[in-house]
Image (cartoon, grey):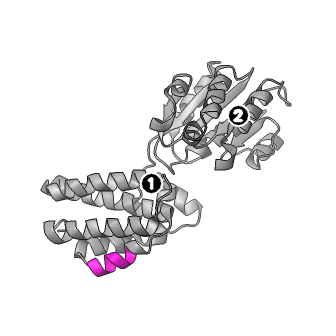
Amino acid sequence: MIGHKKQQTFFRQAFLSGQLSHAYLLTGPEGIGKKLFAKEFAKGLLCPHKRFFAQCDCPSCLQVGNNSHPDYYVYEEKADLNIESVRQIAENASMSTYSGGWRAVIIDNVHILCQADASAANALLKTIEEPGINTVCLLVTHKLDRVLPTIQSRCVNVRFDPLSDNELLAVLKSKGIEPGTVLPYAAGSVSGAMALSAIDAGGLMSSLDSGDLGKLGMQILGMTDKDKFAAAMSAMQGYFLERYKCTRNPDIAMLLQYMDGVVKNLTYNVNMPLVLLDFYVKLADTLSFAGAAR
């Protein structure tokens, strides 16, 4: 497990001191390893040797690794985030564990469940209030503002920070990914770095520096994949924020505000060609009339 040492210590000590809560809300930016952290903690919790955040090849850890442990439940696909799944969690939690020890439940992107289905959110609230003996629920989100306050108040909120450059570099190397020029723009996010690598972030920044509107148009209008465009937006926001700090140019401030709105809208069903075209026009206007790239 790379990174998040403070959080590792927190969970390990909570278990060893007998003060483990029934529900935790793992929050922080997207792509920094929150879900992986939850899985690694669950693995240690169910491990007979209690090897938290460490390599272990016991049958229990191997079962958690391939999602086949009878006391380990993970809901990570959008299709899983519904009332039926929450009812299943409650039903399973009411029964004795198969191993006679702990039970771990992970719900990734819990904000989707909170937004999509009020009945499912209410059922989840009841479940985390009365989860059953030796059951720990780990709720994961990068959109804390979309998680119901009533759910937040029933959980221990554990904040995760972006990975450091060295930690991110180690993760990328472990995945066989050449970081290239993306590291300064990835904001400590593995998924962000991978998406940036796919779109040639270095080339995009060079086009911004040179003010080459033709090249920028080709690069931006070709980003029809939401994740890639979101990663590019993150890199460009960082780029323009640095320039605003140096120039205090109001046109750059307006562009940054506009970009915030674009990123938020990407979470909904949007017409990507129209979004890309509208953004490119706004970007080109800013670069042309305000000299924002210089």
Residue receiving disc 2? 86
Q: Distance from label 1 to label 2 (Cα)?
A: 38 Å
Left or right relative to 236: residue 162: right
> Which of the 4 quarters of the picture holds residue 45?
top right
Is 165 in front, or is 38? 38
Amino acid beneath label 2: Val
Residue 200, percent from left and from top: 42, 72
- Mark 2: few/some/many CA within 10 Å (<14, 14-19, 20+): many
Say which residue appears at 27% left-offset and 77% top-offset: 213
Label 1: which secondary element: helix
Position above or below: 112 against 9: below
Label 2: which secondary element: helix
| Residue 132 visible to the viewer | yes
Say which residue appears at 45% left-offset and 65% top-offset: 272
Left or right relative to 59: residue 227: left
Amino acid beneath label 1: Asn
Residue 77, percent from left and from top: 66, 49
In reply to whether residue 218 is colored magenta, the answer given is: yes
Q: Which range of residues does the magenta coloring cover? A: 213-219
Q: Nearer the viewer, mark 1 or mark 2?
A: 2
Q: Which mark is residue 166?
A: 1
Q: How many marks?
A: 2
| Residue 52 visible to the viewer | no
Position above or below: 125 against 75: above
In reply to whether residue 117 is colored magenta, the answer given is: no
Q: Is the stretch drawn in magenta largely helix, strand or loop? A: helix
